[in-house]
Image: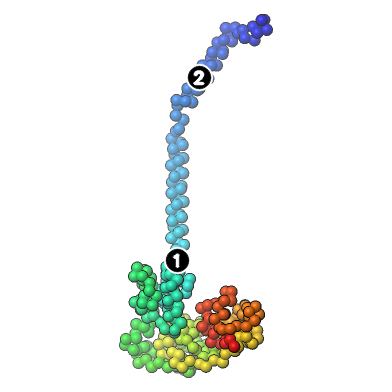
Amino acid sequence: MNFFRSHFWYNKSQRNGILILITIILIFQAIYIFVDFSNDEVNFKDLELTEYQDYIDSLKVIQKENNKSKIYPFNPNYITDFKGYQLGMSTDEIDNLINFRKTDRFVNSAAEFQKVTKVSDSLLDQISPYFKFPEWVSKSKSNKIEIRGKKAEIVVKDLNTATENNLTEINGIGEKLAKRIIAYRKLLGGFTFDDQLYEVYYLDSVVADKVLVSFKVIEKPIIDKININEASFKEILHLPYIDYNLTKKILNYRDDIEAFNNMEELKKIDSFPLDKFNRIALYLTAE
């Protein structure tokens, strides 16, 4: 009994201390439950965080606008698959234009572009302000062109028989450019398509447009084709539009299939440049 009394018996001073301790604990508990510890500093930090987030969002909007593809004036006759996709054209609409161009014809107005491609009125309204047709299109009604600053009647000549002197009559064509055009014509074995002129190195498209007012392919060249099933690596590599890597792919594919049955099989080659098929086919035959 004395043992328990020694542990649970407190004097007056001790009892007062315990009472004060309990009172303090209860006060702190009450403060924790009933007092709101939120203050202006926390609200200020929340406001500051919101403003910072708004700033970040505004930067994202600016970056998104800057990343948007800008449209510059272009000739719609030379829209590629990727360019058409950027403009919002469907696959069928792009194919309609490409197939039309394969016939060596051009669209010369927004209305004609819509007729060929079948694009909607809304899409045409969006992209047609950026159409840039050759200068001769706007002058075709008068059938006149400015040559060296003088108005003259257009007399269309054969691009394949044009001499250096003939070409230098066009404003923008100097001696060097004229030589370069003739050299490229010789490399091709003659121009088969008018738009091959745009492939001439360092010939600006605007100047090329002027050339095509007075010079067009009237008589297509006769090109000696080589048999793709018998041609050597060197013979194929020597052809226009075909580089080293494409030559390897052609010969590797020929080894796999033993022989080409027709030229269309070239399109089955991995990464074959389909946009150049009609040009490459000018120099090859499958026999």
Residue 13 x, y percent position in the rendering: 58, 8
127 above or below 285?
Answer: above
| Residue at 56% from the left image edge and 13% from the top image edge | 18
- Amino acid marked by disc 2: Leu
Residue 204 x, y percent position in the rendering: 47, 81
Residue 131 image-quadrant placement = bottom left
Between 5 and 274, the one lying in front of the other is: 274
Q: Is residue 3 left or right of residue 98?
A: right
Q: Quadrant of the N terminus?
A: top right
Report the Cα–Cα distance between label 2 and label 1: 68 Å
| Residue at 45% from the left image edge and 52% from the top image edge | 57
Q: Kindly identify which residue carries mark 2.
A: 26
User: Quick one: label 2 or label 1, which is nearer the N terminus?
Assistant: 2
Q: Secondary structure at mark 2?
A: helix
Residue 135 x, y percent position in the rendering: 38, 82
Q: Quadrant of the C terminus?
A: bottom right
Whether residue 136 is visible here, answered yes or no, is: yes
